[in-house]
Image (spheres, helix red, strand yellow):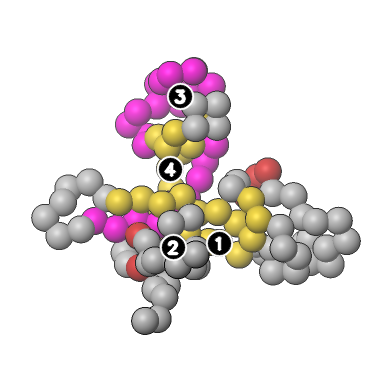
Amino acid sequence: MEKKPGPCACEKVVKGFYCADDQKDLVEAELKDGACPTCSKKPLKVEYCSKTAAGEKVADRARITYACNGCAATGDFEKEFKHEEGCKKKTSTLKKVCSKSGTAPHQTIPK
């Protein structure tokens, strides 16, 4: 599977929200009293790689996922991350990964 550079190739990491029940990304302006406008449940706080293409007003975003440096475990949300049994680095910081490019935020894949 070929990995292509995603939004992490430039600009910044931004905070946002994700509704797990509706499986959709949300921005703060869409929330109603801090809840998802569709299901009324509190969304998860997440981070996104973000870039705005020339001439565009809306940024392209890709959710950041997480991986452990010690075991092969990966997860969509830091708060719900589960290490593999026997992982020796359970207390170490998780590695952030752009869900679009598969690389760390702000990195591009060499050609």
Disc 2 target residue:
101
Disc 3 from disc 4: Cα separation: 12 Å
Q: Earlier in the sequence, mark 2 or mark 4?
A: 4
Residue type marked 1: Lys
Task: Return the residue found at the far bottom.
Answer: 111
Badge 1 or badge 4: first in the primary sequence: 4
Q: What is the CA distance from the residue labelled 2 to the residue labelled 1?
A: 12 Å
Q: Name the residue type under label 3.
A: Cys
Q: Which mark is residue 16?
A: 4
Residue occupying the point 55% across, 54% down: 65
Q: Earlier in the sequence, mark 1 or mark 3?
A: 3
Q: Which residue is mark 3?
A: 36
Classed neighbour count for the residue bearing mark 2: other residues with Cα under 10 Å, few (<14), some (14–19), many (≥20): many
Could you tell me which secondary element the residue under label 3 belongs to?
loop
Q: Earlier in the sequence, mark 2 or mark 1?
A: 1
In the rendered image, which quarter is residue 94 located in?
bottom right
Kindly tell me whether residue 51 is visible in this rendering.
yes
Can you say whether 24 is above or below 64 in the image? Answer: above
Identify the magenta region.
Answer: 27-52
According to the image, label 1 marks what residue? Answer: 96
Any magenta on residue 40? Answer: yes
Name the residue located 40 percent from the left edge and 81 percent from the top edge. 110
Tell me which label, 3 or 4, sits earlier in the chain: 4
Disc 2 versus disc 4: distance between alpha carbons?
A: 19 Å
Q: Is residue 33 visible?
A: no
33 up-or-down from 48: above or below: above
Front residue of 101/77: it is: 101
The CA distance from mark 1 to mark 3 is 25 Å
First in sequence: mark 3 vs mark 2: 3
Left or right: where 84 falls relative to 60 = right
